[in-house]
Image (cartoon, helix red, strand yellow):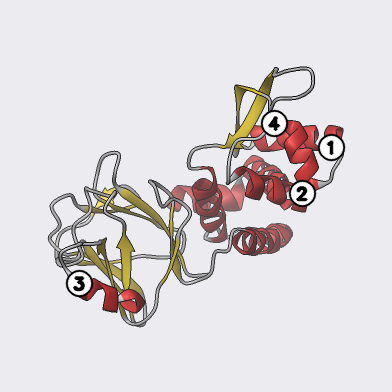
Amino acid sequence: MTDNTIQGRRDPEYLIEMSEYLSALANPVRLQILSALETRPMELKEITSITKTSYENIRKHIEKLLLAGLVRKDAGMSSETMTGIHPVWKYSLAPGGMEQVITNLSMFSKVPLMITHVDLADQISTIRNEICTKFGVTSPCMYLTTGPEEGKIFPLNGEKVLLGRIDPTDLSYSKMHGSTVLLSPEYKSVSRISRPHARIYHGKKWEIEDCGSTSGTFVNTEPISPHTRRNITDGDLIILGTGNMSARFLFITE
């Protein structure tokens, strides 16, 4: 964080790159494209139909999203038409793309900007609010970014929230939805709710504690010690477990 703070305050090139990145997100059509691609890969004609924008404009928007690393381009096949099925380019959200957007915006928000660039701070806040609204993200919440329930939003209610996986043998979990973040059984590396994987506490500050889980809890990829509370802030990445079936959340409070 120290390096970013120094760079954000003194390096004009950093500010220019930040402005270009924000510019790629600022257009409402691009947000509409990202929202559409969240459901499935699409070719340009499909995106044009959904956004009701010209083919040429959509192509330009897609190019900016590709350069920003938010969208990926893969070879695919078109839907069947009168002339048959043809090879086309299909566009989809880059893996972890939305996670990276919100994380970047959170990081930018924490960088003190020079007074001459106060407009960037306003732009960061505006774009983040638009993205959260477009994707139905409310705060405070945990935004799940991996696995079969990717995109699910878990509101954080109360002073203590349990994090874990549904235990089909424990019927008590069904009475605890207001104070739990429950993952489906597919997240096999995450502890059962009968012995929560982790807890989040909300008092004067936000904290997380690993409950002695077997697969660990991580904040921004750094492991936290069991039964020890650690401060967490808006934009942090919370990871429960390891491997392909771990659960990665964006922690959002603003």
Q: Which amino acid type is shown beneath numbered disc 1?
A: Asn
Residue labelled with disc 4 = 43
Q: Which amino acid type is shown beneath numbered disc 3?
A: Leu
Is 131 above or below relative to 14? below
- Taking the view exactly as shown, the residue that stands out farthest to the front is 82
| Badge 1 element | helix
Q: Which callout, 1 or 3, points to the residue nearer the camera?
A: 3
- Badge 1: few (under 14), some or many (20 or more) residues near its Cα, within 10 Å? few
Q: CA distance from mark 2 to mark 3?
A: 45 Å
Mark sitting earlier along the chain (2/3) = 2
Q: CA distance from mark 3 to mark 4?
A: 45 Å
| Badge 4 element | loop
Mark sitting earlier along the chain (1/3) = 1
Q: Position of residue 80 (x, y in %)?
A: 70, 25
Mark sitting earlier along the chain (4/2) = 2
Residue labelled with disc 2 = 29
Residue labelled with disc 1 = 57
Q: CA distance from mark 1 to mark 3?
A: 53 Å
Label at residue 162: none
- Badge 4: few (under 14), some or many (20 or more) residues near its Cα, within 10 Å? many
* Nearest to the observer: residue 154 or residue 125: 154
| Badge 2 element | helix
* Nearest to the observer: residue 109 or residue 189: 189
- Label 4 close to label 1 by CB (< 8 Å): no
Q: Which amino acid type is shown beneath numbered disc 4?
A: Glu
